[in-house]
Amino acid sequence: MARRRERPPLRQRINRRTAALVALGAAVVALYAILVPLQTVLYGTPLPLSFVLGAALCVSPLLAVSRPLWAIGLFTAAALVLPLIVVPESAIQSPWPWSVPALLTFVVFVGVVTFLHGARLGAFALILGAIASLLAPVLRPDMVALPESSASATADLIVTTAVASAMFLIAALVAGRARVAAELTREKEHSALEEARRALVEERTRIARELHDVVAHSMSVIQVQASTARYRIPDLTDAATAEFDDIAATARSSLTEMRRMLGVLRTEDQTAELAPQQGIDDIPALVESIRRAGVEVGLVLEGGEAAAGAASAVQIAAFRIVQEALSNAVRHAPGARIAVRLHAEARSIRIRVHNAAPPHRPEGHAGGYGLRGMRERAEILGGSLSAGPATDGGWDVDAVLPLDPATTITPSPALDKETP
């Protein structure tokens, strides 16, 4: 039964910034809806002026999000003019120079400026707002002519300045804490990335050390023994000598590949290249080396000009797929005839490796990772690979690689069985 694909987590539809802007907008609209009728009824301000000045006062917190200096200037002007255009007979019985909605708007404005743009701009907005309110009694002495009205105005100024100052301190502390938390989060992410990178480098170094100490050493011994066989073993035939020479050449080639791979593993940016990589032009030599081992292999190359223009990653993948397919056929179907065909088209290269049914079935082999590796090479480039039994009892490996790795080709269904 196929595993169910895990669904990716749903993205958060509304982030914190959007939610905060929505809440701020709702608060501003509510304050405006209260300020305009209250200013008109209780303070005697003409309705058109209440609309205009109330809008200037209430829109300043929203404008402060992107244009703090403009918002400070607009708010200060509205806070200066609004207390001056009142009727003393009506306003003397209400809080003045700051009405309750205006006071709340001032507090919200100072908090927004301080939290978003720092304590310096927040203090600037607080001081200008306080100065504008202090100028109101100077410009309208009739509003503080009586002892009762003077005491009421003084209390209003003290309360407004105290509440706005408290909001300034709270916003500054919260903003500082948010900045520290964001910095700690960035440091944790950086530390996690460095830890993962260090673990990756250590693992690659360990693999490189094992390859060097075990595999490379064994290949060196094979190469030395094969190269010196003609001198150590008397009466070798020419065929046996040629066979030992082929073994030595294969060992030397494998050592070159091993040195290149060790260089990549020990280079953190994975850019080390100690030897040129094989490509499609090297496939005939690969097939010839298999033939020298006594295997009957047929090779057909079509569209050589198009294949020559393929990207280096495609060239390497084509060579490795043919190499692994031949290795599997030789190992799992000894004595069977193998046919290799490469056909380069305008946009892709098609590879087919077919081995006939072997004369006798070999002993069972444990499954490996050859087919998976070939399929991963093809899929990384946007191609596809399928492998499975052929109608004649043999085994087929079919791959399609795009000449341009950015091109996506629909993958074909494939089997993961290693043994043909």
Image (spheres, grey):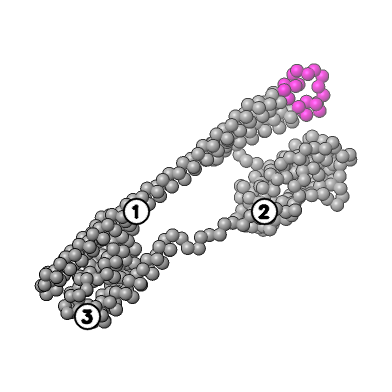
Q: In which quarter of the image is the C terminus?
A: top right
Q: Which mark is residue 44?
A: 3
Dot 2 or dot 1, earlier in sequence: 1
Say left or right for 183 vs 398.
left
Residue at image x 34%, y 70%? 28
Residue at image x 28%, y 54%? 169
Amino acid at the residue labelled 3: Gly
Dot 1 or dot 3, earlier in sequence: 3
SS under mark 3:
loop
Residue at image x 71%, y 41%? 369
Position of 73 relative to 374 (above/below): below
SS under mark 1:
helix
Q: Give the range drawn in magenta.
A: 225-244
Snapshot quadrant of residue 30: bottom left
Residue at image x 20%, y 70%? 97
Q: How would you rate the neighbour count of disc 2 (Cα within 10 Å): few for under 14, some for 14-19, many for 20 or more?
A: many
Most foreground residue, 11 or 194: 11
Question: Where residue 334 sits in the image (x, y, percent)?
Answer: 83, 38
Q: Does the segment drawn in magenta span residue 219?
A: no
Dot 2 or dot 3, earlier in sequence: 3
Q: Can residue 46 be seen in this view?
A: yes
- Are the residues at dot 2 and dot 1 in contact (C-beta closer than 8 Å)? no
| Mark 2 lies on residue | 383
Say left or right for 244 vs 93.
right
Q: Residue 175 carries which label?
A: 1
Task: Give the foreground label among 2 and 1.
Answer: 1
Position of 261 relative to 236 (above/below): below
Q: Main secondary structure of the magenta part?
A: helix
Task: Give the foreground label among 2 and 3.
Answer: 3
Most foreground residue, 25 or 362: 25
Question: Where residue 212 sits in the image (x, y, percent)?
Answer: 62, 29
